[in-house]
Image (tube, helix red, strand yellow):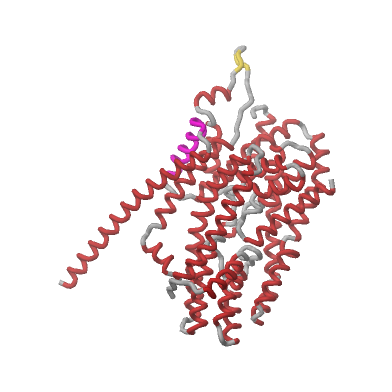
Amino acid sequence: MPKQNISKEDKALLKKSFWGTCACLRTTSSVVGQGRAMLLSTAPFIEKYYKNKEDRDEAILREASEYVNTNQAMFGLLAGVTDAMEKEKGEHGNLDTAVISGLKASLMGPLAGIGDSFIFNCLRVIIAGISISIASTGNIFGSILFAILYGGGTLAIRYWGLVEGYKNGTKLIDSAFNQGVIPLIMDACSTLGAIMIGALIATNVKVTIVAAPVIGGATVDIQGMLDSIMPGLLSLVLFAICMKALKKGMTPIKLIFTIMGACLLLSLLGIL
Amino acid sequence: MLTKALLVTLSYYLAWMLDSIFSNQTFTRPIVLGAITGLLCGDVKTGVIMGASLEAVYMGISGIGGVTAADYRSATAIGVGLVICSGITIEEGIALAATAGALLVSFMQVTVAVSNVMEPVYMRLAKEGNVKKYNLVMWLHMFLLQHLLDTLVVFVVVYLGSGVVDKLMAVIPSWVINGLSVSGGMLVVVGLCLTAQALSSKALPFFILLGFVLSKYLNLPIMAIAMIGVVISYVLFSQNKKINDAKKANATVVKDNEEDDFYA
């Protein structure tokens, strides 16, 4: 399957295929997941390389009815590999359908994992962090920056994946896993993500105690005292408590309502 | 009021359509949707500020594994819409948005159900091998059907809500309003926790502390912190890679020896 040079014809087909990958979150369903988009992505190659109408219809139905679910940016790589396989089968007919279906099914899980940890939880957190800090003053450039960097970035990754996946077939993904660097990269990304989260806690989580009880004639400025120990101490404490609650199995929705309830109560008592 | 509510609804629909065309989960993110809603309703600044806050709140909420904890999209449109339409403060708006997002998440199931109902139509077209028609049906489905209900819900909530919110604000005691405002500043923590949970590093708490210190004590801008983070994670990565390679080399040596013994 390895193809090093892409012909002009195939380049045009890949462009059409890219528009197909842009359907990957358009209308998903519980039955086929992103299968509809996979049909649109592979259709240019199926229609071009399957000579026999019966075989072509069989391939179209097969692609449309197989379940696919992966990260949107990584969808390109999966579609690229599938394109290469469909072309091979259409041209030479020497590829079993089980290989196409099996490879697709076995690739989409790892690709979803890679995409979610690299792109969704690392790249996006960094881009969002920078954009939020600009936008929080009301500067629309923050929103535009996010749309360009994250929106454009994931499209670029998807296109790159489509071309590389088509060129190298499965070689690319195999080599990354065989070298065993994937977990290490995930670790590095997590480190970076954690630092960004720490910075976002410092700038965005606001917990301020307004209560200033009068004890023995002197006003006690509780917040001032806490600040002199460590500024933003309560934000960190709140973060730690919420982490613990989530770890114990509390749902995010429950956590949101608990925080709101607690705020109302503390506000009634005049503490917050 | 009707025009404003319609504009909020339009911005929600527009963002969804843009997201559906490119499938890149960008235009319905709060930071972008908030700006779009603000732009259409004539108050960009409020929209962008609220979008930024809500982006932090919903940072960790995603479609990973198909589980969605809150509908951040309608929450953003409704929150920004109510702030612009009924003149409540931004913090109160965020608290209202969080409530709406938690309650409206069930409507997302309806969207999926609509798509599931359409499945037989798609299957029939695929059986005929008619990709052109298949594509066309998908576009029509996206424009006319997919987000019909949730768009309608956003409209009803903003249209009725802005009137209701105005009246309520006059009646509600000040501690409730203060409590809601304060919780708006704290809800961010939920999103950050969820993001932190998705990360996988043993030293996670220490790096979170590092980021906190860099920002709070040293007052570094977020860009500088990101660059420091890149340096640290690169150094860690290359160290770990060395260890990993050494381990691998050892493992192969052992393997070779065993094989030698076997054949000897």
What is the span of residues highlighted in magenta in the rendered image?
A: B202-219
Q: Is residue A255 visible?
A: no
Which residue is at a point 76% across and 49% down the rendered structure image? B8
x and y percentages locating residue A269 in the rendered image: 67, 28
| Most foreground residue, A147 or A104 | A147
Q: Is residue B221 visible?
A: yes
Snapshot quadrant of residue A266: top right
User: From the viewer's perspective, is residue B108 above or below residue B115?
Assistant: above
Assign the magenta stretch its main secondary structure.
helix
Which residue is at a point 70% across and 62% down the rendered structure image? B111
Snapshot quadrant of residue A222: top right
Residue A220 falls left or right of residue A118: right
Q: Magenta stretch containing residue A30, yes or no? A: no
User: From the viewer's perspective, is residue A198 above or below residue A151?
Assistant: above
x and y percentages locating residue B34 in the rendered image: 69, 46
x and y percentages locating residue B165 in the rendered image: 79, 41
Which residue is at a point 54% across and 63% down the rendered structure image? A159
Farthest-out residue, right: B2
